[in-house]
Amino acid sequence: MAERLLAIALPRRWSHVQGVASRAEVVGPHLVGGPVLVAACWLHDVGYAPDLAATRFHPLDGARALREWGADDLICGLVAFHSAAAHEADVLGLLDELRAFEDPQGLVRDLLWYLDMTTSPDGERVSFDDRIAEVRERYPAEHYVIRALDGSMAARRGAVNRAEAWLSSAGLADQV
Ligand SMILES: [Fe+2]
């Protein structure tokens, strides 16, 4: 489904999604929520698809489409709130709409954020700091993504740190 929506319309975004999801597929077999993590990674950016971009806020558009298609509430919530989306929603005045979904806490959520925020637009593994620097370069200073970035750094770093600690404890730090 993600390929059908993104591969032709947004090939670079599709490369990113393939990178995130292929890393999730390495992690998946090692945790209870593995299948959910893998599915959420494939689907996390479907809201960028032109066919779905109703509000042009991709976490919300993606989560709404997934709910309409009958996806599990957990996957809808993971997509809705991925990678500090709540901070961007707040800046955009869309937080109430986003709260039609639930922000699931825990390892699967942290790993989704981590994998998204350490995969480049071309699908390569990068450090969190490099990825944030790349986002800052990609958008103009007044863009909502940049305005939301500073307020969300603690939440982002928290997720990255917890995900990295778990990956290390599972012996996966060098494989993902
Ligand atoms: Fe992403």
Image: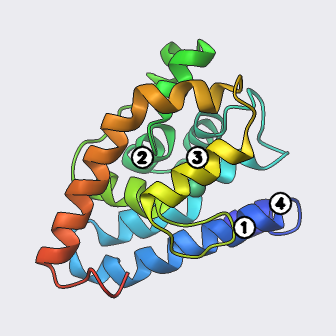
- How busy is the neighbourhood of tag 1: few (under 14 within 10 Å), some, or many (20 plus)? many
Q: Which residue is mark 4?
A: 10
Mark 4: amino acid:
Leu
Where is residue 123? Give x, y as percent: 62, 73
Q: Earlier in the sequence, mark 4 or mark 3?
A: 4
Residue placed at 38% from the left, 84% from the top?
26
Mark 1: amino acid:
Trp
User: Residue 14's mark?
Assistant: 1
Q: Is residue 115 left or right of residue 143?
A: left
Q: Earlier in the sequence, mark 2 or mark 1?
A: 1
- How busy is the neighbourhood of tag 4: few (under 14 within 10 Å), some, or many (20 plus)? some
- Residue nearer the viewer, 122 or 109: 122
Placement of the N terminus among the 4 image quadrants: bottom right
Q: CA distance from mark 1 to mark 4?
A: 6 Å
Mark 3: amino acid:
Leu
- How busy is the neighbourhood of tag 3: few (under 14 within 10 Å), some, or many (20 plus)? many
Q: Which residue is mark 2?
A: 78
Residue placed at 67% from the left, 32% from the top?
57
Q: CA distance from mark 4 to mark 2?
A: 22 Å
- Residue nearer the viewer, 114 or 49: 114
Q: Earlier in the sequence, mark 4 or mark 2?
A: 4
- How busy is the neighbourhood of tag 2: few (under 14 within 10 Å), some, or many (20 plus)? many
